[in-house]
Image (cartoon, rainbow, N blue to C red):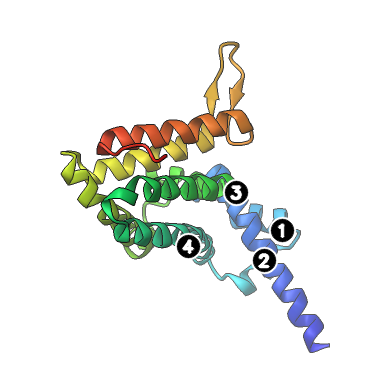
Amino acid sequence: MVASMDSREAAERESILRSATRLFSALGYDGTSIAQIADTAGLDAERLTTYFPTKRRLYLDVMGRAHRFLADVIEARAKELLAAPPEQRAEALHRFVDGYIDLVADHPEVPALWAHRWLSDACDIGDPDSHNAQPLAQFAVDSMTAMAEAAGADPLYTTYTMIWCIHGFTLSGVLDGSGERHGVHDVRQLRRFRAHMHQLLERELRLPSPP
């Protein structure tokens, strides 16, 4: 009986987190209510608050999960880039770019959540920026610094160029000549985008293309 209750509570909590993630990424924190989240999760608002007493607490948990997705990729690829000898930096950079593209293609809610924050959504909640995003972003910048400075490039803006481009392509894709939109689910366009990002950063950092 206890195991059954634990399983039910775990399922309800996960349903709340998934529903909140979907709504926060679509409507933003400011545009989403607890009632909407509860309705999407198939619960009443009172039941939801037994797991998350406030919308702020729920938002921080959603952003914490998004941060963990980012951290798993960025920390591993940045460490690899920092450790790569000069002749292997281009390959390590490609793996960094590809890892980030794969992450946001699999979890488009991550760039969507951050797009809302970049537009001042949940501006009264600073924790995701100061405790999560800023140190992780700085680690990514640090991994680019030696290459960028050697090429006379700005490491901060080189890193953010990669982030902005990948987030933009994931969220919006590109329009073809007929006005049809193509994005990460279009295999051909995704392959073109990867190649473009590789070339863009190679040229910015004056790295030779890997064989």
Residue assigned mark 3: 106
Helix or strand or loop: what does disc 4 sit on?
A: helix
Please tell me whether mark 2 or mark 3 is closer to you in this view: 3
Task: Tell me the crowding category of disc 3: few under 14, some 14 to 19, or many 20 or more residues within 10 angstroms, Cα based.
Answer: few
Q: Are dots 3 and 1 in contact, CB under 8 Å? A: no
> Which callout, 1 or 4, points at the residue further toward the start of the chain?
1
> Which callout, 4 or 2, points at the residue further toward the start of the chain?
2
Please tell me whether mark 1 or mark 4 is closer to you in this view: 4
How many circles with numbers are drawn on the protein? 4
Task: Tell me the crowding category of disc 1: few under 14, some 14 to 19, or many 20 or more residues within 10 angstroms, Cα based.
Answer: many
Q: Is 39 placed left or right of 119 in the picture?
A: right
Closer to the camera in the image, 41 or 145? 145
In this orientation, does residue 60 appear?
yes
Residue drawn at x 50%, y 44% is 101
In this orientation, does residue 31 appear?
no
Location of residue 23 with respect to 17 vertically, above or below:
above
Name the amino acid type tagged 1: Ala
Q: Are dots 4 and 2 in contact, CB under 8 Å? A: no
Q: Residue furthest right?
A: 1
Helix or strand or loop: what does disc 3 sit on?
A: helix
Name the amino acid type tagged 2: Glu
Please tell me whether mark 4 or mark 2 is closer to you in this view: 4
* Picture quadrant of residue 15: bottom right
Helix or strand or loop: what does disc 2 sit on?
A: helix
Q: Residue furthest bottom?
A: 2
Name the amino acid type tagged 3: Asp
**Mark carried by residue 72:** 4
- The quarter in which the N terminus is drawn is bottom right
